[in-house]
Image: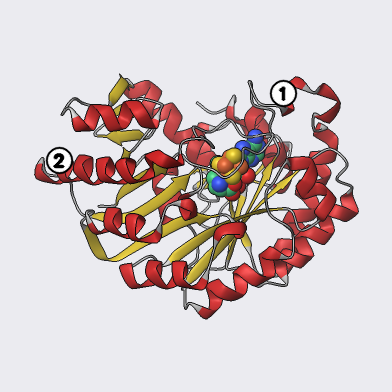
Amino acid sequence: MNFGVYLHIPFCARRCDYCAFATWTDRHHLMHGYADALRADISGAVAAGMPAATSVFFGGGTPSLLPAEQLVAVLGAIPRTADAEVTVECNPENVTAPLLAAYRGAGVNRISLGVQSMVPHVLRALGRAHHADAVPRTVGLIQAAGFESFSVDLIHGAVGESLDDWTATLTRALDLDPPHLSAYALTVEAGTPLASDPARFPDDDDQADKYVVADALLAQRGLANYEISNWARPGHECRHNLLYWSQGDYRGFGAAAHSHVDGRRFWNVRTPERYIDAVASRRSPVAGEERLDDDARRMEGLVLSLRTRRGVPAASLDVDALDEGLVAPTGDGERVALTRRGRLLANEVALRVS
Ligand SMILES: C[S@@+](CC[C@H](N)C(=O)[O-])C[C@H]1O[C@@H](n2cnc3c(N)ncnc32)[C@H](O)[C@@H]1O
Ligand code: SF4
């Protein structure tokens, strides 16, 4: 059985204009106490019978901002299977050779690098802290440190990004030979600086064009699409994300982290202060929970699976979707998966699943 552990690291050097994640730029003084709280919380879960993790994911925020010894100490508290996938999300501006060496030594075997764009004016439009030059340098360090796998995360649709800019981002990223690549359409999240500036909203048609260019280029270079926004060389698919998409069990630790165990969903308090305080005073950091009934759970499973190349049983979609070229039969013929056109209209196709 697969079991995932997610660690949320809610600190960033600077907030990107589009990001609504639970992260803070003015609370670095809490890092030490936060890492201690994570370890204490994990130890409690282990004592209560938490199974060994088949995947561990440090996400954020910016996990690479946390001093390496603190991240390593947190990882050390998590029981893992011998072949566990261990990913750390890193931002190019704060990755160094000693940081990567410390990760490697502790069992981290996958880096997910937040690149977003390889074009300077697009990085500025996104409000990113790093310069495009930092990316090849960082990937060189990741390769030299001996990581088995790494991913490059990209975003398309920033204001002023032309189709040529996006193609340049893709080709420069592909020149770094990443085994895995994520490309997200920029979304406008409430409460962000981006949301208050309609002149900078992305355009749907432009994003669709960029998706088509990405999928074609990535396929040409041996990266197969395995979820709407994710591509990988065979064997480099992210096991942790596959677990989410197959409704597997996982425990999330830290501020705003979500968990899913035996059909029960629960999530933690949102701020690092409240999380540290709850753990220190031996109260539960859980802020809310829900349980899906069997029908809702089955539907959610179908919709998640539809977004992946595994697809859904042919009988769960109306025949029109096949006729319209939105889905096509997969290898065994019993299932259907989204075509490229279907992936562009995934939300509409999902409404036709039953
Ligand atoms: C929350 S970030 C954390 C990792 C790291 N701090 C970084 O910036 O890459 C994880 C991924 O979510 C993406 N993301 C965050 N907000 C987004 C948005 N509004 N639209 C599309 N992608 C977004 C980021 O660009 C990044 O690739
Ligand atoms: S996108 Fe990443 S670096 Fe930017 S604010 Fe969000 S978590 Fe921080």
Q: Can residue 326 be seen by looking at this rendering?
A: no
- In the rendered structure, find residue 96 and report the number of the disc placed on it: none
Other-residue count near label 1 (Cα within 10 Å), few / some / many at <14 / 14–19 / ≥20: some
Q: Residue at x 75, y 20 (%)?
A: 196
* Spot occupied by residue 294 in the image (x, y as percentages of width and height): 32, 23
The three-letter amino acid code for the residue at tag 2 is Gly
Position above or below: 303 against 7: above
Viewer can see residue 69: yes
Figure quadrant of residue 270 = top left
Residue shown at the point (29%, 33%) measured from the top left: 276
Find out whether the residues at labels 2 and 1 contact each other: C-beta distance under 8 Å: no
Dot 2 crowding, Cα within 10 Å, few <14, some 14–19, many 20+:
some
Q: Mark 2 highlights which residue?
A: 44
As helix, strand or loop, the secondary structure at mark 1 comes to helix
Q: What colour scheme was applied to this rendering of the protein?
A: secondary structure
Corner quadrant of residue 33: top left
Residue 126, relative to residue 287: is it above or below? below
Q: What percent of the width, then of the height, locates residue 285?
A: 27, 27
For label 1, the residue is 195
Q: Residue furthest front?
A: 29
Q: Nearer the viewer, residue 33 or 217?
A: 33
Which quarter of the frame holds ligand 2?
A: top right
Q: Which secondary structure, mark 2?
A: helix
Residue type for callout 1? Ala
81 versus 195 height, above or below: below
Mark sitting earlier along the chain (2/1): 2
Image position, residue 329 (x, y; %): 59, 49
- x then y, percent, for residue 49: 11, 44
Q: Is residue 179 left or right of residue 239?
A: right
Measured Cα–Cα span from mark 2 to mark 1:
40 Å
Residue at the image position 62 percent from the left and 34 percent from the top: 19
